[in-house]
Amino acid sequence: MRILPTILLSLLAAGAVTMATFLAIDGNLARITGWYRFEPGMPLFSAENMHQLNDVCWMRIQDLHDEIVCAKDEHGTWWIIKPFKDRLAPSVVEAIFHFTANARLVDTLPLNNITRSNMREFGVETSPHRITLKRPEGNDRLTTVARYTLGSTSPWLADAGDGETLFPTTYLRTNFYGRDKRIHVVSGNILHIFKEGLEALRDPSPLQFEQDELRGITISYADSAKHEVKLSRISAEAPWTIVSPIITGADEDNVAKLVRSLLSIKAIRVEDAIEVNLSDKPVYTIRLEGTWGEKPREICIFEPFTQEGDDQKYCHATVNDRPVVFTLQAEPRANHTGSYARLIKAICELPVLPQKAMAQVRMANKRIAVSEIPTELPALRSMKFADLDTGDVARFSLRTTRGHGAIRMLLIPGDAESKVEDTWMFATGGSRYQRAESAQVNRFLSGLSNIPVEKVVADAAPGEDMAPLLAQYGLNDPDYILSVLPRPCMVRATIFGHDLPMVKDRNPRTFLLRRFADPATGRRAWFGSELGSNSICLLSTRFTRMLSLRTEKWKDRSLLSFPISSVRRLTLDFQQAPLVLDYEYMGETWSGTLKGEDITPRINPHRAAFYLRQLQKLKVSQWLDPADEDAIAALHTPAFSVKLELEMTDYSDAEETVVEQTEDISDAPADMLQENNEDADAAILRSLATMERKTHAVTRTLQIAPAAYDSDRPFFYGRVQETGQLFILPFEDAQSLAGDILDM
């Protein structure tokens, strides 16, 4: 009688072992207990299973004839490990995981004779794609997370729930939950990724890397006449530098295009290396080095070829981490269209975006051809004469070797909190500094740093003496020498336990400029070179037109600079009896005479105050040479004159102090900024602000005369009578000076 309980206990134990086995394999007991209860809208797999998708490390994909097994390595990259070794396309992994996580039941077809007679239509038996996903369970075991068989595309569209968005659906069968033979309709469709067969699931991208990890690029050519090109950078934020065959800055846009192209290029075919006959040597090899490890990534590009019956050009390529050969598009595809079609296409493709953005859009919407990847030195090198940060310049000077002329520029830093703008000052020879035209200075610096050179005419190898090349283009005796001094940088140092700020100067940069006959063509052009560089550049005239030592070129275009509080008298002479207006600032009152008669009641104080503000804002179009004949002839009989009598406070000592302090910081390395130095600076500023200042009378008379009116843009000549300075005044501004101040 004890045998029966023993048998029952044995059966229960065997059942428990069986259920535990299925739990380990499938993660569920539905294999034993029967069908899983599906309802419309339910996910295909449970939320618990889908939370484990990130842990999936093994995948099998089967169709009617083939099977591939894939595994994820320690870096998160998926590889096909059976029946061949190659990288799996990331887009395939993303599509399968997205479908598995988001598939929802739309409907379930009952198992009856009608269903069984139409199995070919559903495709789950005639054209199936079986997918199995597994994750690690410990002890080197794997547990199934999802398993299903994809059939054909179903004719239904699934509603996303918003009443507008519709999704395609697919016939599907899954035995993950037991011996369920029913056919389900689920949302989503990924059949398109299998249309070329399972071998086409190889990654068509030859290279895979993180851009931020990239530190070096080397382009080697089989042609011995071409030099190997090496680029390097020290960090992801640092600019690229060409270190061979010359040392120079790189064109950041073209290097970025090179990197993007290497990541974006897609193969037309991927084949096992044993199936393709390659030539002995590649045309060129690109080697990438980065922080990913010691092993570089390499791609070899071979000679272009054409296929029978196809006039398109292709080329083979290999990489060092995959045993395959890629067939790439060698040149952009030829468009065989008629003239009218080409015209319409050209009109439709007219760019409406900035050039850089349009290039990115075009690159994203077409297959990249190998010939479009910039790999030559001229394309990768920077074509900027001086790669300067215009906001980083503290001083610069322009001098000539043909005389003693020189222009010195000095930046007086402003204060953003006090809304005080930076001010540029300039001086010529031994003269005092005066206010410069900031717009002109900024245009000059922008031209120096941003306007590209026309071409690089000569390079010296690293370590080679530049003297022969400088002499060849006349730069050993330049017309101009331009020296640029960057702003000092603030660093901190710990000295005797104290954390102290320090000012550290940076080396100036010096550029040589010469108008010289090109030894190759005989054409006279501007050439330039930076001291310490190894290149001679043919300069763009857009920049060289800015080279000038004339004071009129750099002088601030503000015609008059005075505070309203300094005005004492304003005299307007329109070739009649002059109108004399006296101003009292404290009471903001006006009095005046015309032809010896008191006209104070007729003065409109609002018009008079507006007139003064107009004088304050006047800017000349251009300062002229004091000997300009046309201006002198026109001003022989001026149309009208404006005389301003001022009582100005003398701040020259304060200005000199500010300039001297700025020059001290810019000229030589500064000592540590001790607290007593800061106190001394504060004391100087307090003294300058509180000391009693002298005043002196200043008179400025503007004589205005019209130029010839046969030009399209009429203007007025002007002269400051006291200084003899000539200028051109815009027509509208000259008209504003003729405004009426008196009431009728």
Image (tube, grey):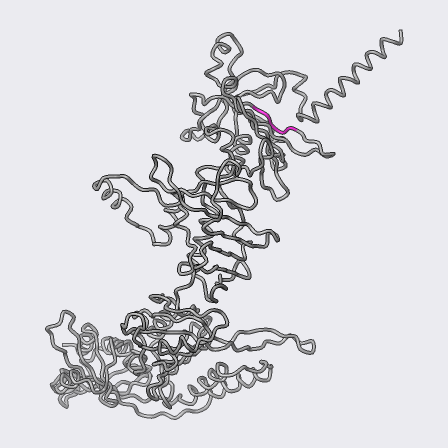
Quadrant location of residue 34?
top right
Quadrant location of residue 555?
bottom left
Q: Residue 518's spot in the image, x, y percent?
A: 31, 73
Magenta segment boundaries in residue numbering: 144-148
Q: Residue furthest front?
A: 280
Q: Residue 346's spot in the image, x, y percent?
A: 26, 45
Q: Residue 631's spot in the image, x, y percent?
A: 17, 83
Number of labels in the image equals: 0
Against 427, residue 97 (above or below) is above
Camera-side residue of 237 and 649: 237
Q: Is residue 147 left or right of residue 710?
A: right
Q: Was residue 667 drawn as part of the magenta stretch in this picture?
A: no
Kindly identify the residue that appears in the image at 66 percent across and 75 percent down: 494
Camera-side residue of 107 and 140: 140
Kindly identify the residue that appears in the image at 55 percent across and 20 percent down: 173
Q: Quadrant of the N terminus?
A: top right
The answer to whether any part of residue 732 appears in the image is: yes
Q: Residue 236's spot in the image, x, y percent?
A: 53, 58
Camera-side residue of 603 and 477: 477
Prevalent SS, magenta region = strand
Camera-side residue of 624 and 486: 486
